[in-house]
Image: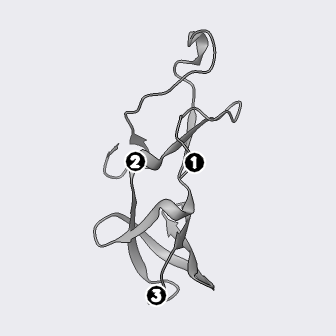
Amino acid sequence: MQQTPGDDTAELECVLHHHGDAWGDDIGRSIQLGIRPEHIELTSDGNAASVRSIEPTGSETHLQLEAGDDIVVAVLGNRPKLTVGEPVSFTYDTANILLFDMETGIWLTDHQAR
């Protein structure tokens, strides 16, 4: 994924599998990127965010992170020592990205359940 500094958009190169006869008018459509919360990882050098909320739930911790204008939800299998408002960095494996057609909501990527 490539992101231009100061820009809130990113370029992502990926292979899309179409579930129809031909791409036709589908080329150039807007897509939405999704990542499951369990695939978000805190890291020392990733996407900048701040902790919005922390919710311990048994063996997991649910976090809401503010990353610019976006809220990112992460589910961690540990108990990080964090406080609300604390700056953090997060990342994710691009193999876990889910893409959806913005107009129809149809899932465009072909990942097996993880």
Tag nearer the camera, 3 or 1: 1
Cα distance in 3D space between marks 3 and 1: 30 Å
Q: Which residue is mark 1?
A: 113
Local packing at callout 1 (Cα closer than 10 Å; few below 14, some 14-19, many 20+) is: few
Tag nearer the camera, 1 or 2: 1
Decide which of 111, 50 is in the foreground and name it.
Answer: 111
In the displayed structure image, the side of residue 81 where residue 65 appears, left or right = right
In the displayed structure image, the side of residue 53 where residue 93 appears, left or right = left
Q: How is the image coloured?
A: one colour
Q: Which mark is residue 82?
A: 3
The amino acid on which the numbered mark 3 sits, given as a three-letter code, is Leu
- Earlier-in-chain disc, 1 versus 2: 2
**Furthest residue in direction right, as rendered:** 104
**In which quadrant is the N terminus drawn?**
top left
Cα distance in 3D space between marks 2 and 3: 25 Å
Local packing at callout 3 (Cα closer than 10 Å; few below 14, some 14-19, many 20+) is: few
Q: Locate residue 6, reporting x and y percent.
A: 35, 52
Q: Which residue is mark 2?
A: 94
Q: Is residue 102 above or below residue 21?
A: below
Q: Secondary structure at mark 1?
A: loop
The amino acid on which the numbered mark 1 sits, given as a three-letter code, is Ala
Residue at 40% x, 78% y is 87
Q: Locate residue 32, reporting x and y percent.
A: 57, 41
**Furthest residue in direction left, as rendered:** 45
The amino acid on which the numbered mark 2 sits, given as a three-letter code, is Thr
Q: Locate residue 69, reporting x and y percent.
A: 54, 60
